Image (cartoon, rainbow, N blue to C red):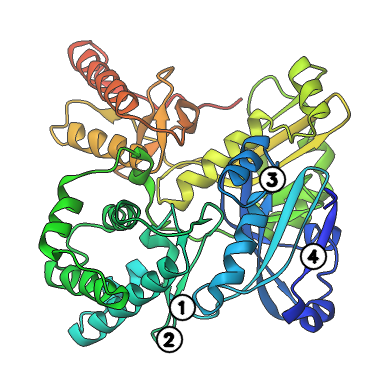
Amino acid sequence: MPRDFWIINSDESNRVQNMGLTSPEFVEQLRSVVVSGHIRRNVSRAYVCGHEIFIKREHEIRFSDRLKSFIDGQGFTSLAAREVNILNQLKNLSPTWLAWGERHGRSWLVLDSIGPCESFFDFFTNDKNHTSRSYVLSQIAQGLAQIHSLGIYQSDLFAKHIFILPDRSIQFLDWQRARLSNSISFSMRKLCFQKLYQSIPTNLILPDEWNLFVKCYRDRLGLKFDIESFLNELKMNSTPRTQLRYAVMPSVDQELMRFEGESLCAIPDYYSELLSILDHLYQPRTSPETLPIQGQQFTLESSTYPFSMSRFFNRIQRKVWRSPHLKTARLLLHLERYGCLTNKLIAYGQQLTCLGGRSFVLSKPVSPVQPIEFSDPQIVPKLNAALARLHEIGIILNRQSFPFYLSHGKIAYDYRALTLYRKLTNRHIRRDQEWLKSMIEHHRTSFASNFWNPFKVN
């Protein structure tokens, strides 16, 4: 199959044609709201002809992803192709795919909306009716049993990927890393349950409910194992993947939309004004500066990028290069999604030429800014809790400046002192904890009892 192609779901052909989803160029130009994302891919929501769709965009199809798909028996394919293969098997347990394709080393997968629904966390937090909770848990267990009976192993079975529809049916999302297997071994089943167990907050699901959940799963597949022993193993044997620390549901919805390709990604309220000064936003600056818009003060950072060998080799390998400002925007977006108080991302953009390029990021600073009162006896627990939250969502300290300050008595984060790092390990956690402890001791014993937020603009 050629690298540049576009495939439409034959069962949804008429609807796809009516919506105009017949090419990746059309999908790319849709005004879509980014709902989640990683460094190399994101998921956005768009409306076409009044119908809600979701677009999974893979900025860069890596050779390692294709190789892993080949090893898993799914061919030398992209993540989008892997997900389509799984969705074709699942039918009613997952969203319907409408179209997908690849072009210039990128991929797109268009998914139909599952409609009104509740997340796993919202349902079990709000619904206290025992009968209702038990029924939904049995539905999830039966759905998982059906998935395993089809020989599908979901390596990312987290609670945030489970949604409950109004009729109490279940939808499972995010199948890019799933794989097909001839049979699901007991160790694979246990690992699935282990990841699900660790991604659910303590006491959200009661012990009796866990017993019911495992029993429904066991009985549906006709398996024979002791439920109590199985649950004890889940509690005792923690998975070595520390990424599970941030397998939590975002706490804030964002409305960041892409306009003009990647030249401008902005909150819709500011789109028209920013588009009129787009060239000014891209002018290179040696340091951040203040930009007034609609009577508010924003922080603007921008740079140009000359020729470099890394950019040259990226171009040859048809890889998408990400500027430091796009990485900053990704970090701000991540912090905001998980409810961490920091600069609010307003807009960002990147324009690349054959060998050079330029980029910018626009954010709204936290106000008012107050110093850290190290003499306050409650400040140390607050700082430790703030650091633990960063680790939970996959962020570490770069240890170049102090990362915390105060705003209205709440801990705020200086994004310049943070790094989004998905492969978090216990070594990173210990290193950050030791550094924070030494900084607290230093400022408590020095004459400077206050530590101001280092973020300043000209």
Q: CA distance from mark 2 to mark 1?
A: 6 Å
Residues at badges 1 and 3 in contact (C-beta under 8 Å)? no
Q: Could you tell which of marks 4 and 1 lies nearer the N-terminus?
A: 4
- Which residue in the structure is indicated by mark 1? 117
User: Which one is closest to the eye, mark 4 or mark 2?
Assistant: 4
122 relative to 393, above or below: below
Q: Could you tell which of marks 2 and 1 lies nearer the N-terminus?
A: 1
Q: Residue at x 54, y 46 (%)?
A: 333
Q: Describe residue 190's horizontal placement relative to residue 399 as left or right.
A: left
- Which residue in the structure is indicated by mark 4? 7
Say what amino acid the circle numbered 1 marks: Cys
- Which residue in the structure is indicated by mark 2? 166
The quarter of the displayed image where residue 388 is located: top left
Say what amino acid the circle numbered 3 marks: Phe
Element assignment for label 3: loop
Q: Residue at x 42, y 83 (%)?
A: 169
